[in-house]
Each structure stands twice: as C-alpha cells, then as structure tokens.
Amino acid sequence: MASLKPAWRERFERALEERQLAGNLRQLRPASTRVDFCSNDYLGLARTDLLVEQAPARAGATGSRLITGNYPAIELLEGQLATYHGAESGLIFGSGYTANIGLLTCVARRGDTLLYDQLCHASLRDGLQLSPARTLGFRHNDLDELEAKLRRSGGQRFVVVESIYSMDGDAAPLVDLTSLCTRYDAALIVDEAHAVGVFGARGEGLVSALGLEAAVWARIVTFGKALGGHGAIVLGPRYLRDFLINFCRPFIYTTAPPPLSIQHLGLAYRELERGTQLAALRGVLAHWEEQIVKRFPHFGVLLGSSAIRVWPVPGNERAKALAASIRQAGFEVKAILHPTVARGSERIRICLHAFNTFAEMEALLQLLNRESEKNNYEFTRT
Ligand SMILES: Cc1ncc(COP(=O)(O)O)c(C=O)c1O
C-alpha cells in the first residue's frame, strides 16, 4: 500500500486530532445489542427476514438503468409505489442521499431559486450546494420569512422541506406551505424519509395523511427507515420522471438497485399495507405521549406525533454523559451533538418502534425522570 509522505499525512491527522479534542470524533462501532431506541427501523421491518420464503433474487443489477440494469420488477414497483402514495409516477434511486442530491442538482437552473428550511437534512443541503440555482435558507418552519424571500426571489422557485425533521421529529406546516407555494407559483419538494411508515392510514406519509398529494410537486420516500430496506423513490409528475431519467446524473451514472433489494421492498410494502406493525407503532407512540404528559407536563418540547423524540441536554459533554448512562442501563439512544446541531441544542434522540415494549419504555422514562430531577435545565425547542 502506498504511504503518504509525513507532511501530507499531517493534515489528515491534524483534522482528526481536532475532532478528538473537541470531543466529537466519529467512529464506527459494532452493532449494538441493547434495546433499540435509536434506529430508523420504526416498524421493525429490518429485523424481519421478509425474503425467507422467496425464490432468490439477483444481488446485482449489472449496470445503469439506461444500459443493462433495467428490469421489469423495478418498473413494476415504481408504478405500484406511485399508486400507493397517490402520485403520478416514481423513479427509484440507490439511496435517499443520491435521490436528494440528484433531484436538487438538476431541477433548478441558473436564475432559478431554491428556498430551503435551515433544518433540512445534509443530503438536501449537499444537493442545494451543487445546484447552479440561487439558494436561500429560511428559519425552521418560519413561513413569514419564507414568504418574504419568495417575494424577492426570481426565476422558477422551488421550496424544499422535510415533512418530519430528522433531528427534532417535528412536522413542517405542510397545509400552509402548499397554499403559500400555490400563491407564489413555487414548486414544493418534500422529503418524507421519517414520515412514511408512520403517518397516513396505510403509512403513506404525512403528505397523503393531509390529502396534499396534488399540491406537492415532488416527494422523496426513503426505504432505509420504516421500510427496513435501502434506496429511495422520487414521486411526482410523469414529466419529472422522464426529466430525471435524462438529466439526473446520480440516476444515470450508477449501477441500478439490485433485484434483491426490490424484492424486499415489494414485501415490505405488503406488510405496510397489512398494517400490523403500523398499529403496534401507533400503540407505542400513544403510550409514550400519555406518559410524557403525565410525568413531564411542562416540557412541551418532549411532545410530538412522530417516532422521533428529543430530550434536550445542552453541551456535548453532558449529552454524551447522559447517553452513556442510558446505554449502561441497556438502552441504545443517540446523543446528537454540535456540529450536527447548533451549540446549546444538543440532545438525546429517542426513536420509538413498533417492537418497543411498555416495560422498556417505562424503564427508559424512569431514567429520564431521574435525570430531570437531578438537572432542572430548561426544555425549549431551539
Ligand atoms: C430526512 C432524510 N433524508 C434523506 C436521508 C438519506 O436517506 P438514505 O439513508 O436512504 O441515504 C436521510 C437519512 O438519514 C434523512 O434523514
């Protein structure tokens, strides 16, 4: 293996040392065996081997969709998912990250404007950065600021939001957003990564739950969360699908998702439609909410309707210490630290799942109760 000269190596090592000193060095760890209050497997579909009785599918697609990698099952699934989510069409990508980058880099041209909620996920932010269009952020869920910026922006306008935000688990004001976008003739793009499998009568997402399918121009549904798989679909008008096939580089220049993954997704959607896991998740969410109201009546920030809940602990060190003590008690939770969130809004993120038992929730709530008695810090949404 070629080794870099010491002077070259130094800058990589220095960057890592700086992270280490700041207490936020990222490291890969073995999978946890603790009770899962951390993953995005909201319905438990990733822990169910849906493929067990299926004829084996190929693990490779052999090429890009435009060369040798297209196959009937993937097109069939795209059609089925578009119908499931009430969209005209859909195009599958290898991941939510590439779907977001691909969509945002190619739909807007120079002279257009992409307006985005400042709490949007890194994949959307990266897509915005690569776009030739002008990008304008607005404060989280602040529609007055969005409107002011819509008023003074030019070209075709696109507004980019998440229906459920991945760090806070709160919702975008989608009804008002759609009216605002209609008024300003702006195209609304909604990332539904954390809403699909949780909201809607059949887990279709928040857009469908609110009956806004026709008012939202494009949606991104990721398969790595509640669907327990991998990949994503961009839902929208048929011309958008055709446009992406022609102009979206992260769709064109990559190997197609494998038949194995598509087979899993067909089965995962069948489970979603059946509704057993969704009903179990709703029971867990209702129980958690009831307990929060009872035990922490003043802490509005702890309430919510999604599967993502936060326990604010200002400061990286405090957040890490609390996460470590929760882990020691056998529960896997994630400390969300600066720079992922703004300084002072560090938190413990608790993800709830269909498979979490009431006894597990009770034990975790007792730990949090003890913590809130020990430290009476302010609970405010930031
Ligand atoms: C809101 C949001 N969008 C997109 C993604 C990326 O999806 P994927 O994991 O499929 O790349 C994530 C994943 O963390 C996310 O939270």
Image: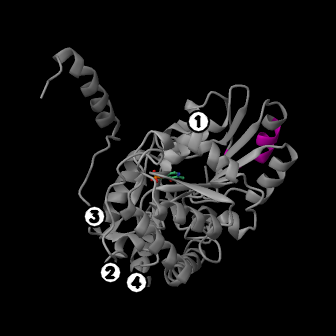
Q: Nearer the viewer, mark 1 or mark 3?
A: 1
- Say if mark 2 contacts mark 4, CB within 8 Å: no
Q: Which mark is residue 53?
A: 2
- Say if mark 4 contacts mark 3, CB within 8 Å: no
The residue at which mark 3 appears reads as 32
Report whether residue 378 is seen: no
- Say if mark 2 contacts mark 3, CB within 8 Å: no
User: Magenta-highlighted stretch: main secondary structure?
Assistant: helix
Mark 1 surroundings: few (<14), some (14-19) or many (≥20) residues within 10 A: many
Q: Position of residue 255 (x, y in %)?
A: 39, 46
User: Which amino acid is tagged 3?
Assistant: Ser
Q: Position of residue 336 (x, y in %)?
A: 44, 51
Q: Earlier in the sequence, mark 2 or mark 3?
A: 3
Please tell me whether mark 3 sits on a helix, a strand or a loop.
Answer: loop
Q: Position of residue 238 (x, y in %)?
A: 68, 53
| The quarter of the displayed image where residue 31 is located | bottom left
Report the magenta residues as a range: 140-148
| The quarter of the displayed image where residue 258 is located | bottom left
| Rendered residue at 68%/56% (across/down) | 172
Q: Nearer the viewer, mark 1 or mark 4?
A: 1
Q: Position of residue 134 (x, y in %)?
A: 68, 28
Please tell me whether mark 2 sits on a helix, a strand or a loop.
Answer: loop
The residue at which mark 1 appears reads as 105
The one of 7 and 303 positioned closer to us in this rendering: 7
User: Which amino acid is tagged 4?
Assistant: Ala
User: Which amino acid is tagged 1?
Assistant: Thr
- Say if mark 1 contacts mark 4, CB within 8 Å: no
Label 4 to label 3: alpha-carbon separation: 19 Å
The one of 9 and 363 positioned closer to us in this rendering: 9
